[in-house]
Image: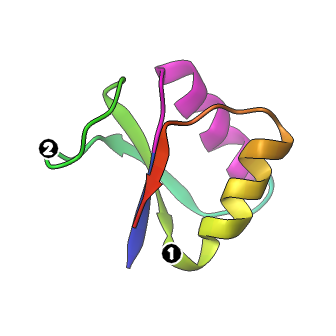
Amino acid sequence: MTSFILFFSNNYVIWANRKLKELNIENKMIAVPRHLSSSCGYCLEIKNEDKAVAQKILKEFSIEYEEIIS
């Protein structure tokens, strides 16, 4: 299963994508699925088991996000 990290802007999506990849957290930048809402058109798709680690990394590097949906 996957989780989706929604962001407030495309800049945060790109920054988070790069930082998570640098730290070996597999993720994919995708268009926000229609059934989800977001302030920007892109989100990151991650494995559910990486959710807590990704959340910690985003906080550590002050990368703002809207929410994580499982």
Residue drawn 38% across the image and 79% down it = 1
Residue 2 location in percent, x, y? Answer: 40, 71
Q: Main secondary structure of the magenta part?
A: helix
Q: Where 30 falls versus 55 (above or below)?
A: above
Q: Which dot marks residue 34? A: 2
What is the quadrant of residue 52 in the picture?
A: bottom right
| Residue under numbered circle 1 | 48
Q: Residue at x 78, y 51 (%)?
A: 57
Q: Is residue 10 above or below residue 55?
A: above
Q: Which quadrant: the C terminus?
A: bottom left
Lower position in the chain sequence, tag 2 or tag 1: 2
Q: Is residue 30 left or right of residue 37?
A: right
Q: Position of residue 50 (x, y in %)?
A: 62, 71
Q: What residue sits 83% from the left and 37% below the top?
A: 61
> In the image, which residues are magenta?
6-22
Give coordinates of residue 26: x percent, y percent. 60, 63
Q: Residues within 10 Å of mark 1 (few under 14, many from 20)?
A: some
Question: What whole-number distance in Å separates the C-alpha atoms at marks 2 and 1?
Answer: 20 Å
Q: Residue at x 36, y 24 (%)?
A: 40
User: Horizontal placement of 35 versus 16: left or right?
Assistant: left
Extreme residue in the right direction: 60
Amino acid type, mark 1: Asn
